[in-house]
Amino acid sequence: MSRGDRRRVLGRHALLAAPLAASAIFALVIFVGPTTSQSATPPSVELGALLFDASCSSCHGANGEGIDGRGPSLKNEGRAAADFVLRTGRMPLADPSAQAKRGPVRFTEEEILALVEHVGLIGDGVDIPNVDITNADLGNGGSIFRLNCAACHVASAAGAPIGGNRRAPSLALSTPTEVGEAILTGPGSMPVFGVLTEDEINDVAGYVENLAEQNTTGALHFGGAGPVAEGLAAWILALIPMVALTRWIGRARSGRDPSEEDTDAIEAAK
């Protein structure tokens, strides 16, 4: 075959391959979907306002100003606080006088994003932190946790009663972002730890995640149930040998204690 014939054959093959290549690329785009460079749909401000009016305004007021005896003002809150209570199922709260506890999430992802955006427009609080535990220093995180958090959440992060019919919750189900949000917003009775740096927040969140992976709040890890349960268990464990020792000391022994006949004789002689 001459050089010219080979060129003509290669040209025909190229013309045939072009449509196939285009089809393959088109199918790949459809299968994979939009590229990551495309921005996500922004939260719907209208949806957030509607949801807030239906689910939140009865306690926090139509404009987030708060209602005395029902719910606080949201003027000093922000996206981080709203995201925390919505993703942990703490809001909406059926009984405003009760402590907000982790529960089932009531809203879809789209609804959460919309509500968070709406609260962010109402208040001037902190935004959702970007918590990254990839390179967290667990040693530093543990030191900060024991110094600032263990007094209420206990060393295992299992949580414990803190008085006033309140309880510091378990952190076993907390995500790193939720830990960061709690540090910056101080939900419930928790103080705000705004002095912690971004790296320190990452370290604490990484340490809490490590505790969850080790299941330190599980039944097999003694010391993870909190001071009340641990103290009760310690008393029971100490009481059993004390009762056994008392019974052994008080048991009658021959040669040391008089027999029943001797006791009867002594009583008759009196």
Image (cartoon, grey):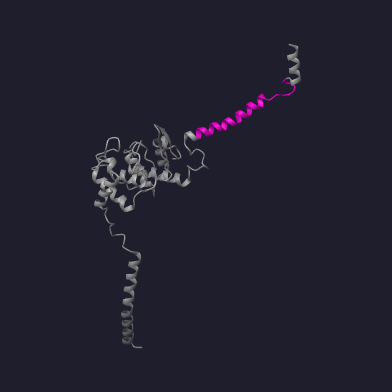
Instruction: Residue at 63%, 29% (x, y): give it.
Output: 244
* Residue at far bottom of view: 1
Answer whether residue 237 is magenta in the image.
yes
Q: Is residue 55 left or right of residue 169?
A: left
Instruction: Residue at 50%, 32% (x, y): give it.
Output: 231
Q: Position of residue 132 (x, y in %)?
A: 36, 48
What is the magenta range?
A: 230-257
* Residue at far top of view: 270
Answer whether residue 10 is magenta in the image.
no
Q: Relative to 59, is 10 above or below?
A: below
- Give the total of numbered labels: 0
Q: Relative to 209, is 2 above or below?
A: below
Q: Main secondary structure of the magenta part?
A: helix
Residue 77 appearing in the image: no
Quadrant including the N terminus? bottom left
Q: Relative to 258, is 86 above or below?
A: below
Instruction: Residue at 28%, 50% (x, y): give it.
Output: 114
Q: Position of residue 29 (x, y in %)?
A: 32, 67
Q: Position of residue 87 (x, y in %)?
A: 35, 47
Q: Quadrant of residue 38?
A: bottom left
Front residue (pair 248, 105): 105
Residue 250 appearing in the image: yes
Instruction: Residue at 34%, 70% (x, y): give it.
Output: 27
